[in-house]
Image: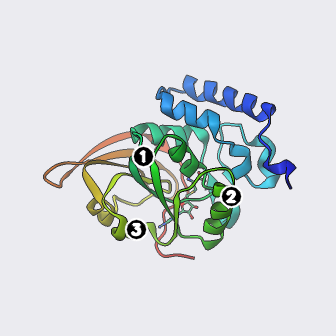
Amino acid sequence: MLELMEDTFLHKGLRQKLVEEIKKKGITDTNVLNAISKVPRHLFMDSSFIHFAYKDKAFPIAANQTISQPYTVAFQSELLKIKKGDKVLEIGTGSGYQTAVLLEMGAQVFTIERHKTLVMSAQTLLPKIGYRPKFFYGDGFEGLPTYAPFDKILITAGAPEIPKKLIEQLKIGGLLVLPIGNDQEQTMTLVEKKDNGSVEKVEFGTFIFVPMLKGKV
Ligand code: SAH
């Protein structure tokens, strides 16, 4: 067990290669690249996929969900333009890998997950390796009104549309990054809340996420 929690020189070397790979794919934000080079992704994977941890691919985790592809994590993190101390709401904790990347970038993270089993495993793993977000078991469509407003909101599941309550919980000038589409594919979308409360949308490429679903399980 102890052995499984190790982060060796081999792992660090593989991460460096992964960073080079996502740089080639167009990620330039040094804060993002630095975070990817630091977070031990192999510790977030199911044991049967651990040897593939530094491949730039999504893999299955518990509850029929996935750990996002590193390039996708980097792309969403870059769009968020994270600054030290940013208060970030993340919808879809999953393995907690993206959560750790945001923390490594200097954000203060509030993360919501609708699968109890995933909340429990992330809540056990992250503090053990030095990452301390605030965890919530709940429905991300509701957000966290008690802790609002947020500087940034990130949705890591495919949403059918922009969730209204999340816009309400965003600061003026704040950013929401989410994939919008059906359960087959989605368009990465950056939403900025303007000072009259309206929103401005910019669309990026096509991505594939597990769907954002209502309620908790
Ligand atoms: N960022 C995660 C990606 C996990 S996949 C990682 O890197 O591992 C997306 C996650 O969103 C799944 O765990 C899924 O259960 C969760 N999810 C889907 N709809 C949700 C909702 N309404 N509220 C909270 N979490 C949700």
In the rendered image, residue 138, in percent from the top left (x then y), is placed at 49, 72
* Closer mark to the observer between disc 2 and disc 3: 2
Upstream in the sequence, badge 1 or badge 3? Answer: 3
The reply to whether discs 2 and 3 touch (Cβ–Cβ < 8 Å) is no
* Closer mark to the observer between disc 1 and disc 3: 3
Residue 217 position (above or below residue 163): below
Badge 1 crowding class, 10 Å Cα cut-off, few under 14, some 14 to 19, many 20 or more, is some
The reply to whether discs 1 and 3 touch (Cβ–Cβ < 8 Å) is no
Residue found at x 54% / y 53%: 209
Amino acid type of the residue that numbered disc 1 sits on in the rendered structure: Thr
Where, by quadrant of the figure, is residue 125 drawn? Answer: bottom right
Q: Is mark 3 within 8 Å of ligand 1?
A: yes
What residue sits right under mark 2 in the picture? 125
In the rendered image, residue 110, in percent from the top left (x then y), is placed at 46, 59
Upstream in the sequence, badge 2 or badge 1? Answer: 2
Which label sits on residue 187? 1
Whole-number angstrom distance, CA of label 1 to CA of label 3:
18 Å
Amino acid type of the residue that numbered disc 2 sits on in the rendered structure: Leu
Q: How many marks?
A: 3
Give 74 or 100, whichever is nearer the viewer: 100
Residue found at x 80% / y 36%: 8
Residue found at x 82% / y 53%: 48
What residue sits right under mark 3 in the picture? 141
